[in-house]
Amino acid sequence: MNKIKQERRKFYHARNIQFLSDGFQRKFVIRFCVVAILGAVISGTIIYMMSKATVTTTFEGARLTIKSTADYILPAVLLSSAVIVIFLAVSSIAILFFAYRRMKVYLCQIEDEIEKADSGDLNVHLNFRRKDDEFKILALSLNKLIHDFKKIVVAAKDDIGNLESDLDSFEQKSDEKVPKKMRHQLEQLKDELSKFNT
């Protein structure tokens, strides 16, 4: 158990409690930007193709010019597509940053409570705000797990107490001693269970 705790602690300190790696975040933003660029190219191409068959009259300088509508709107389509892609890229980075910060707070809180439970404190209770449904479900599951384990430990402590009193009454009634090995194993069990704060 201690070896697992040491490995986990070493892992988290090495990553500085970074639940999502920089590579994952970078790939997410790049993929989102690629999808945004593809969307802009597809919509721009559709608009360009649909307006190729029509013509538009326009004044360039002082002269009236007849142009294909596709050629006329091409600069506006390119500019609006570029603005949309840049806006989506910046907003996706901002959303990822703030979502990750919020998620990191909750994951660190969960990790701290699990550490406390792992060290023997079974009175931990995770509680998140109602709007954070994803983490609330995880918190409820962990709370149930810890509560069920606490019930098992309490029942085991009671059973060991009952067994100890039964052994004492057996010794008094029969004038025989309980084997030392059995007493030693019982004490070991009591020591192990005493590590849990219920």
Image (tube, rainbow, N blue to C red):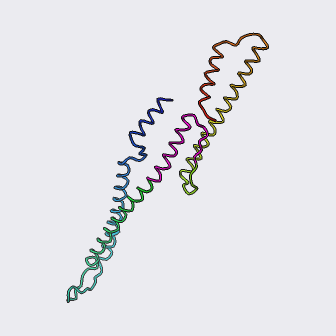
First to last magenta residue range? 101-126
Q: Between residue 40 and residue 80, name the one nearer to us.
A: 80
Question: Is 194 left or right of 30, judged from the image as shown?
Answer: right
Q: Between residue 172 and residue 30, name the one nearer to us.
A: 172
Question: Is 187 left or right of 56, judged from the image as shown?
Answer: right
Work out whether 144 lies above or below 88: above
Q: Which residue lies furthest to the right in this view?
A: 173
Question: Is 91 left or right of 117, judged from the image as shown?
Answer: left
Question: Is 4 left or right of 131, judged from the image as shown?
Answer: left
Q: Between residue 122 and residue 65, name the one nearer to us.
A: 122
Provide residue 7's location: percent of width, then percent of height: 44, 33
Image quarter in which the C terminus is found = top right
**Magenta span has 47?**
no
> To which quarter of the image does residue 65 belong?
bottom left
Provide residue 88's location: percent of width, then percent of height: 37, 63
Provide residue 74's location: percent of width, then percent of height: 27, 74
Please, what is the dominant secondary structure of the magenta stretch?
A: helix
Work out whether 80 lies above or below 91: below
> To which quarter of the image does residue 97 belong?
bottom left
Q: Which residue lies furthest to the top in this view?
A: 176
How many numbered badges does the structure rendering display?
A: 0
Q: Give the residue drawn at x 29%, y 78%.
A: 53
**Magenta span has 121?**
yes
Provide residue 22's location: percent of width, then percent of height: 36, 48
Q: Give the residue drawn at x 62%, y 29%.
A: 194
Q: Give the residue drawn at x 45%, y 55%.
A: 99
Q: Give the residue drawn at x 39%, y 42%.
A: 15
